[in-house]
Amino acid sequence: MHDRDPQQAREAARPSPPTPAERLGRRIAGRRSDLGLSQEKVFLQAGISRNTYQRIEMGRADVRYSQLLRIAAVLRCHVRDLLP
């Protein structure tokens, strides 16, 4: 059996930097939390499905501009405030 180089093992274990979608999701989640809003309140008011909204916050969904506008409106901020 071939052993991995310890340096390669450390590099493989190191988390990769967040993607732009993940950073956007974190900013949305942070703003929502700051306002004391539940995910449910945001996705219902924004007219987005629960699954899609959860995936947006996790950085696992491509967000449409129209969705981002509606989320920003619910979060009472400008879209640029949510962008990474």
Image (tube, rainbow, N blue to C red):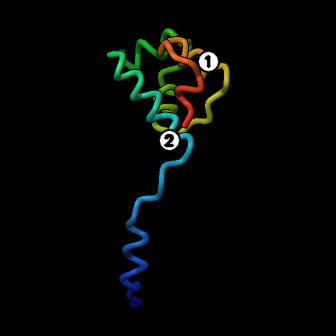
Q: CA distance from mark 1 to mark 2?
A: 18 Å
The amino acid at mark 2 is Glu
- Residue farthest toward the right in the current orientation of the protein: 65
Give whichever of discs 1 and 2 has the lower sequence position: 2
Looking at the rendering, in which quadrant would you find the N terminus?
bottom left
Residue shown at 37%/73% (left/top)? 10
Q: How many marks?
A: 2
Q: Is residue 23 above or below residue 2?
A: above
Which residue is at the front of the view, 27 or 37? 27
State the image coordinates of residue 59 (x, y, percent, origin top left).
Answer: 51, 39
Which residue is at the front of the view, 50 or 9? 9
Residue matched to label 1: 69
User: Which structural element holds mark 2?
Assistant: helix
Residue shown at 66%/27% (left/top)? 64
Left or right: where 37 falls relative to 76:
left
Q: Is residue 71 above or below residue 61?
A: above
The label on residue 22 is 2
Residue shown at 53%/26% (left/top)? 81
State the image coordinates of residue 62 (x, y, percent, origin top left).
Answer: 62, 35
Which residue is at the front of the view, 53 or 79? 79
Looking at the rendering, in which quadrant would you find the C terminus?
top right
The amino acid at mark 1 is Leu
